[in-house]
Image (cartoon, helix red, strand yellow):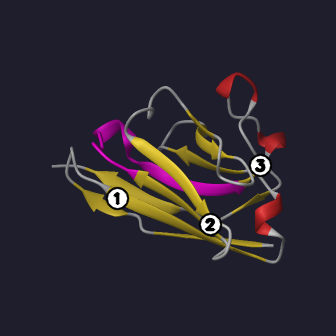
């Protein structure tokens, strides 16, 4: 199993980025997928999840209305479109195999594979 994120970078507040996660080594379309982020000095925070077919999406309150998760099962790729970025969105973003955690609270046991992460910096 391999998950490889890309698309991070530095953006000004109010800007946008699109993260991608290329999956391989498993049947991507059979698994719910999530994005999780971790800011320096803080614990991991679940951001968003999507079900196998892409028809159901879930968001943390902190990103609802600004971020959009999607997937292309034909391309084995997970996406996170991030708009109206705020300084507090700055973090390392990881894609992970697993779905929405209970009460929206990150739980390590929910995810069995992770990517290496991609850094998002929001600064003027």
Residue in the image at 68% along x and 68% along y: 73
- The answer to whether the residues at label 1 and label 2 have Cβ atoms under 8 Å apart is no
- Residue visible at 70% across and 55% down in the picture: 96
Relative horizontal placement of residue 79, taking residue 17 as reference (left or right): right
Within-10-Å neighbours for mark 2: few <14, some 14–19, many 20+? some
> 10 Å neighbourhood of mark 3: few (<14), some, or many (≥20)?
many
Residue 83's x, y, as percent?
A: 32, 47
Which contiguous range is marked in magenta? 82-96
How far apart are the two marked residues, 1 and 2, measured between alpha carbons? 18 Å
Residue under label 3, please give it.
Answer: 98
Q: Earlier in the sequence, mark 3 or mark 1?
A: 1
Give the secondary structure at mark 1. strand
Magenta residue check for 91 = yes
Q: How many marks?
A: 3
Q: Regarding mark 2 in the picture, which secondary structure is present there?
A: loop
Give how far apart the Cα atoms at labels 3 and 1 are.
23 Å
First in sequence: mark 2 or mark 3?
3
Foreground pick, 48 / 90:
48
Q: Which residue is mark 2?
A: 116
Is 62 in front, or is 49?
49
- Upstream in the sequence, badge 1 or badge 2? 1
The crowding category of the residue bearing disc 1, from other C-alpha atoms within 10 Å (few below 14, some 14 to 19, many at least 20), is some
Residue on which the image places disc 1: 17
Residue 68 x %, y %: 46, 47
* Label 3: which secondary element: loop
x and y percent of residue 23 in the render? 69, 72
Compared with 76, 120 (above or below) is above
């Amino acid at each position: 199993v391999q998950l490889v994120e890309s698309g991070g970078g530095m953006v000004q507040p109010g800007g946008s980025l699109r993260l991608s996660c290329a999956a391989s080594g498993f049947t991507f379309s059979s698994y719910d997928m999530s994005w999780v982020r971790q800011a320096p000095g803080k614990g991991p925070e679940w951001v968003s999840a999507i079900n196998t077919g892409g028809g159901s999406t879930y968001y943390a309150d902190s990103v609802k209305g600004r971020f959009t998760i999607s997937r292309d099962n034909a391309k084995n790729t997970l996406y996170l479109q991030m708009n109206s970025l705020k300084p507090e969105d700055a973090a390392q973003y990881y894609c992970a195999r697993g779905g929405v955690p209970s009460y929206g609270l990150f739980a390590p046991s929910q995810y069995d594979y992770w990517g290496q992460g991609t850094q998002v910096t929001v600064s003027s």
